[in-house]
Image (spheres, grey):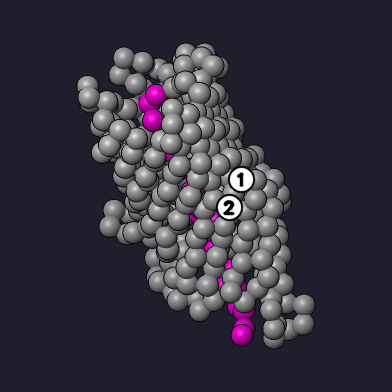
Amino acid sequence: MKYTISLTYLLLLIQTSILAQSGWTREKGGAFVQASVNTFGSNDFYSVTGDLFDQGDRFQSQVLTIYGEYGITNRITGIVNLPLYKSNRFSGTERVGGVSDIRIGAKYALSQKLPISFAIEAEIPTGDGFNFANVQDPIVPGERINLPISDGEFNVWSTLAVSQSLPSGNTYGSLYGQYNLRTQGFSDQYRLGLELGQRFIDRLWLIGRLGIQESVSDDIQPTVSFLYGEGTTYTTYGFTGMYSVNDQWMITAAFNDYGGFITDRQNIYDGTTWSLGVAFEIK
């Protein structure tokens, strides 16, 4: 098996939290904590020009994430997203892993009558963007490829979200827009999305999501795009089921996939992310 540079075209694109952005904030002292395990695998890669390649070797990634929210005041909610362990591999390499980039910030309620919020989150790198995996049965002795757990650059995410629920409390919708300010010369990104939720029985919610990501500039860094998601665009869609075991504990299951029906897929492995989790809430 021969590895070329094309085999390292990769985007670490695992959605670490099944919670979408919303206009609601938590009441003072309220808290929510979720632990989830996500898994992703694919052979199909869309290049920075949108061309589809079957890479032969299957790229695989798994991540264990802790996500938390805490009501600092009735209008301010603290947010933390901690990927405790992320692992990456190709079918022909060893698996490498570690703690991925940490995201921490706060959400402020601009309006509570019509729930509108604005959030600022810092994404803090936990590495320098290099994490080499040994190739199994290499053509060249000591052959390795880079499978980074961290992109090695500091990001700032800004999110504006609006939500509303029907009087019955069994149906809600959210719209959001995000801007990702990237450093070290990477192109900024923006995301737009919507979420619709419906409670079918007393304890079961089904939530559907649709969103896009685009680069702000066409002036990307092609020499590093395969490592850090530079120039990545996509349409994403998925569903989440959330079952309340009691008033505090919940079980969650979700899938997320990518398409090109709104925004073309570029610099992305095309496949499904599956997720299982457990959550705890204090109101």
Question: In the figure, residue 228 lies in which quadrant?
Answer: bottom right
Q: Is residue 6 magenta?
A: yes
Query: Tag 1: residue type?
Result: Pro
C-alpha gap between disc 2 and disc 1:
7 Å
**x, y (%) of residue 19?**
44, 38
Which mark is on residue 83?
A: 1
Quadrant in which the N terminus is drawn: bottom right
Residue drawn at (50%, 76%), measured in percent from left and top? Answer: 55
Determine whether 105 is above or below 58 in the image.
above
Q: Earlier in the sequence, mark 2 or mark 1?
A: 2
Judge the density around disc 2: few (<14), some (14-19), many (≥20) Cα neighbours within 10 Å.
Answer: many
Determine whether 14 is above or below 125 in the image.
below
Is residue 9 at all visible to an observer of this figure?
Answer: no
**x, y (%) of residue 159?**
44, 32
Nearer to me, 143 or 189:
143
For the view shown, which residue lies furthest in the right direction?
142
28 to the left or right of 124: left
Q: Which residue lies under the disc numbered 2?
A: 63
| Mark 2 in CB contact with mark 1 (< 8 angstroms) | yes
Judge the density around disc 1: few (<14), some (14-19), many (≥20) Cα neighbours within 10 Å.
Answer: many
**x, y (%) of residue 81?**
57, 38
**SS of the residue under disc 2:** strand
Residue drawn at (55%, 42%), measured in percent from left and top? Answer: 35
Which mark is on residue 134?
A: none
Magenta residues: mostly which secondary structure? loop
Residue drawn at (54%, 68%), measured in percent from left and top? Answer: 59
Q: Which residues are magenta?
A: 1-24
168 to the left or right of 135: left
